[in-house]
C-alpha cells in the first residue's frame, strides 16, 4: 500500500482535517483535536518568547486515495544543549495521558512504516539544504500505554532502520473496569469501603446536606471553573504546595479547552455544596467508553465529611449510568485507588536517537544526567518513605494535584542504552 507523508507546520493547515483527527483519536479526549490544538495555542511557544524555539511538526499519512489514515501529533523543541527534540503535543504540566500516533486500525502497519521511513530520511538530511528543516536529534514518546500497538510498530520499524531505541516504564495509570450497575460495583468493594460510601450517601445526600451542581451549559462554566480553582488552590496551599492553577498557562489552557470539551460533550464538571458552601469540585474528561478523573478541588475545612469520597461516588455513578466500561484515575500510585478496585495500567517512555554522531553524543550526555537525577530522586523518595505519609495526605481525593508517584523507574531492555 502506497503512503504519502506530509509535514504540517501550522494549525491553520490542519483545520480542514479536524474531523479526521477526532476520528483517528479513538475517543480518547487527550488525543482530540480540541485538546491538542488548544494546547499548542497556549504552550506552543517558548515561555521566554523565543519564537524560533518550538515549531509544529505534525506528520499526516495519506493513502493512495488521498485519505488521511495516520497522524503523528508532534512538535519540535530546539535547544542548544539537546538539539532538536520531537515531542507529543499535550506534554508537560497539563499531564495528558494515553498519547500515541493516531492511525486507522486497518492501515496502522503501513502508516507506521511510512512514518519510520520519513523520519529516517529526515534525520539524515544534511545541514544547509532545504530538508534540514525536518532534521531531528531525538524523538520522545511519553505518556504512552505499554500495550499501544501503533507506538510499538513505529519503534520496531525505526529500530530496523538502525536507530537507537531506549525504553523505560513510565508512571502507572489506574483504571476500574466498571460493571453494568452501581450495586454490582459496590459488591466489588471491601466491606469497609462499601460502608464508607453508603454512610457518605446516607449522611450527606439523603439528609439534604449535600447539593449537587453540574455544568450543563456554557453559561454555567465560568462559575464552576472558579469554584474548582478556588477549592483546588486552597487544598494545595493547606498542604504547603502551590497548586496547578498557580501557572497562568495552565489556567488559560483549561479555561479555553473546557468550553471546547463541553461543546463536544467530553466534559463532566460538577461541584457539591455541603451545608450551603462548595466542598468538592471534580473535573472529568469523557471518552468514548471511559471516564477520566483529571483534577479535583477540596475545601480543607470539610475533610471530616470526606468530600473526596462523595466526589468519587458521584463520578462513578455518572460513569456507570453513561454505560462507560472504564473509570480511569490516571497517573499516580496513591493507595486509595486500589481500595476503589482500580488496577495499575502500565505506561512506557520511549526515546529514539538517529544514526548521527552529534545526536548520539547529545543522547549520551542526557542519559548520564538522567541517571544521576533518578538516583537522587530514589534517595529522596526512600527518605520520605521512612517517615511515612501524613494522615491528611493519605485521604486526598483523585486528580492531577501532585507530581505523579513512581515517575522514575528502572530501565526496560532496549536495543541499546547509549553506553
Image (spheres, rainbow, N blue to C red):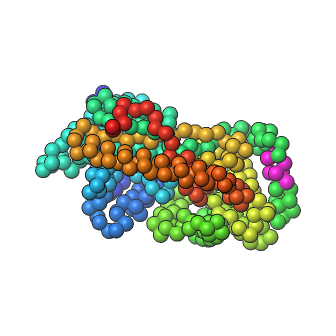
| Picture residue at 72% right of the left edge, 38% below the top | 180
For residue 255, side relative to residue 109 (left or right):
right
The span picked out in magenta is: 193-199
The prevailing secondary structure element of the residues shown in magenta is helix
Residue 185 falls left or right of residue 77: right
- Give the quadrant of residue 155: top left
Tell me if 412 is positioned left or right of 69 in this view.
right
The answer to whether residue 167 is magenta is no
Which image quarter is the N terminus in? top left
Classify residue 11 as left or right of residue 30: left
Total label count?
Answer: 0
Between residue 32 and residue 344, name the one nearer to us.
Answer: 344
- In this picture, is 177 found above or below 393? above
Quick one: quadrant of the C terminus? top left
Residue under the point 64% across and 39% down: 343
Q: Nearer the viewer, residue 69 or 394?
A: 394
Q: Residue 261 at x, y = what percent?
A: 53, 57
Residue at x-position 79% and y-position 62%? 305
Residue 349 position, x and y percent, is 44, 42
Amino acid at each position: 500500500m502506497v503512503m504519502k507523508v506530509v509535514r504540517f507546520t501550522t494549525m491553520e493547515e490542519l483545520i480542514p482535517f479536524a474531523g479526521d483527527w477526532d476520528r483517528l483519536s479513538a475517543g480518547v479526549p487527550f488525543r482530540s483535536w480540541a485538546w491538542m490544538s488548544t494546547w499548542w495555542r497556549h504552550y506552543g511557544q517558548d515561555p521566554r518568547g523565543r519564537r524560533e524555539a518550538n515549531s509544529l511538526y505534525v506528520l499526516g499519512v495519506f493513502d493512495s486515495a488521498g485519505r488521511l489514515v495516520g497522524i503523528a501529533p508532534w512538535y519540535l523543541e530546539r535547544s542548544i544543549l539537546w538539539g532538536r527534540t520531537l515531542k507529543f503535543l499535550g506534554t508537560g504540566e497539563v499531564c495528558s495521558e494515553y498519547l500515541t500516533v493516531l492511525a486507522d486500525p486497518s492501515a496502522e502497519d503501513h502508516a507506521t512504516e511510512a512514518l519510520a521511513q520519513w523520519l529516517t530520511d529526515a534525520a539524515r538530511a544534511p545541514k544547509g539544504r532545504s530538508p534540514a528543516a525536518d532534521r531531528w536529534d531525538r524523538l520522545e514518546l511519553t505518556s504512552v500505554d505499554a500495550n499501544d500497538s501503533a507506538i510499538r510498530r513505529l519503534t520496531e520499524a525505526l529500530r530496523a532502520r538502525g536507530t537507537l531505541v531506549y525504553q523505560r516504564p513510565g508512571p502507572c495509570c489506574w483504571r476500574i473496569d466498571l460493571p453494568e450497575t452501581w450495586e454490582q460495583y459496590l459488591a466489588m468493594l471491601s466491606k469497609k469501603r462499601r460502608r464508607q460510601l453508603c454512610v457518605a450517601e446516607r449522611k450527606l445526600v439523603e439528609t439534604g446536606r449535600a447539593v449537587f451542581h453540574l455544568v450543563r451549559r456554557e453559561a454555567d462554566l465560568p462559575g464552576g471553573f472558579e469554584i474548582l480553582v478556588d477549592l483546588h488552590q486552597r487544598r494545595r496551599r493547606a498542604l504547603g504546595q502551590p497548586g496547578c492553577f498557580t501557572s497562568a498557562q495552565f489556567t488559560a489552557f483549561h479555561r479555553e479547552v473546557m468550553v471546547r470539551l463541553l461543546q463536544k460533550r467530553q466534559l463532566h464538571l460538577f461541584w457539591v455544596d455541603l451545608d450551603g458552601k462548595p466542598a468538592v469540585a471534580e473535573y472529568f474528561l469523557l471518552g468514548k467508553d471511559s471516564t477520566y478523573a483529571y483534577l479535583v478541588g477540596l475545601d480543607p475545612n470539610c475533610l471530616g465529611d470526606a468530600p473526596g469520597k462523595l466526589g468519587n461516588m458521584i463520578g462513578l455513578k455518572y460513569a456507570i449510568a453513561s454505560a462507560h466500561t472504564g473509570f480511569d484515575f490516571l497517573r499516580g500510585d496513591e493507595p486509595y485507588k486500589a481500595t476503589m478496585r482500580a488496577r495499575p495500567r502500565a505506561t512506557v517512555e520511549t526515546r529514539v536517537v538517529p544514526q548521527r554522531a552529534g545526536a548520539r553524543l547529545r543522547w549520551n550526555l542526557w542519559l548520564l544526567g538522567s541517571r544521576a537525577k533518578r538516583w537522587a530522586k530514589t534517595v529522596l523518595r526512600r527518605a520520605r518513605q521512612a517517615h511515612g505519609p501524613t494522615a491528611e495526605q493519605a485521604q486526598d481525593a483523585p486528580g492531577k494535584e501532585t507530581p505523579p508517584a513512581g515517575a522514575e523507574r528502572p530501565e526496560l531492555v532496549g536495543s541499546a542504552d547509549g553506553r
